[in-house]
Amino acid sequence: TENREPSGTVRLGAPSSLADILYAPLAKSIVERFPRVRLELSEGLTESMCDRLLRAELDLGIVTMPQPNDHLAFEMLVVEQVFLIGAPRDPLLQKGKLTKREFNALPAAVLPLSRNPFPAEVPSSLRVDGATPMKRIAASGLGYGLLPFSGIHQEVAAGLLSAALVPWLRADRVLALPRGRPVSRATREVVAALKEICRDMIQKGIILTAPGRLQPTWAG
């Protein structure tokens, strides 16, 4: 049966910042190469996707900085650089790179629902579920957010956001599968396609990789 064309449904979840850039090329690759495979693509935060994997509601997840879990198997997909984002032409971000002193003195932050990647002294009254509202709020000047370049490259190119590298932070993008559950041929082909797409986007400069020695943080 392994030599037969893969078939069946693959349920994949990813953070919205990666879903925006990965899902369309993934769908194209799978539809063209494996027409008997059906994809169900969803978005979500890391904790939610890990729960859905454990409940057998997903076959595969891309998660960011997951907590260790004996029931999930993790494989690094890509380590991304993390950027502070804010309004267009923001003077702090114009320099292109932040210092820790500047980072610790930020006037306001927009936080993800799940974790707080900012220092305790940075005030925030805004928490969001997903990259899109974070980008829009940051663009309005109400607070700074943190995202990898893959999640902001279009807005930066269009002048809708400013961004500066936070050189000591990174975002670990990790493939997650449930342990003890058979992995279908179709799921393995989706994993291979995701790796191929990530390599292509690194070459195109859409995904900016970071050295592994940097400090992990949340960046959705």
Image (cartoon, helix red, strand yellow):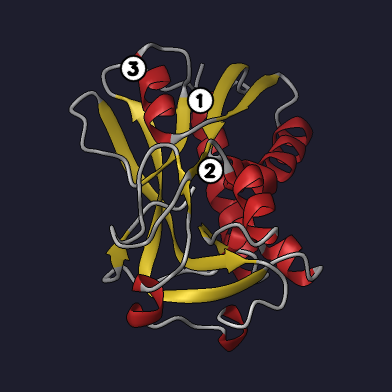
Of labels 2 and 3, earlier in sequence is 3
Residue 160: x and y in percent read 77, 65
- Residue type at mark 1? Arg
The residue that disc 1 covers is 185
- Residue type at mark 2? Ala
**From where the camera sits, is residue 3 visible?**
no
The residue that disc 2 covers is 192
Of labels 2 and 1, earlier in sequence is 1
Q: CA distance from mark 2 to mark 3?
A: 22 Å
Which picture quadrant has residue 38? Answer: top right
Query: SS of the residue at dot 3?
Result: helix
The residue that disc 3 covers is 54
Query: SS of the residue at dot 1?
Result: helix
Residue 147: x and y in percent read 52, 58
Which picture quadrant has residue 176? Answer: top left
- Along the viewing direction, whichever of 178 and 162 lies nearer the viewer: 162
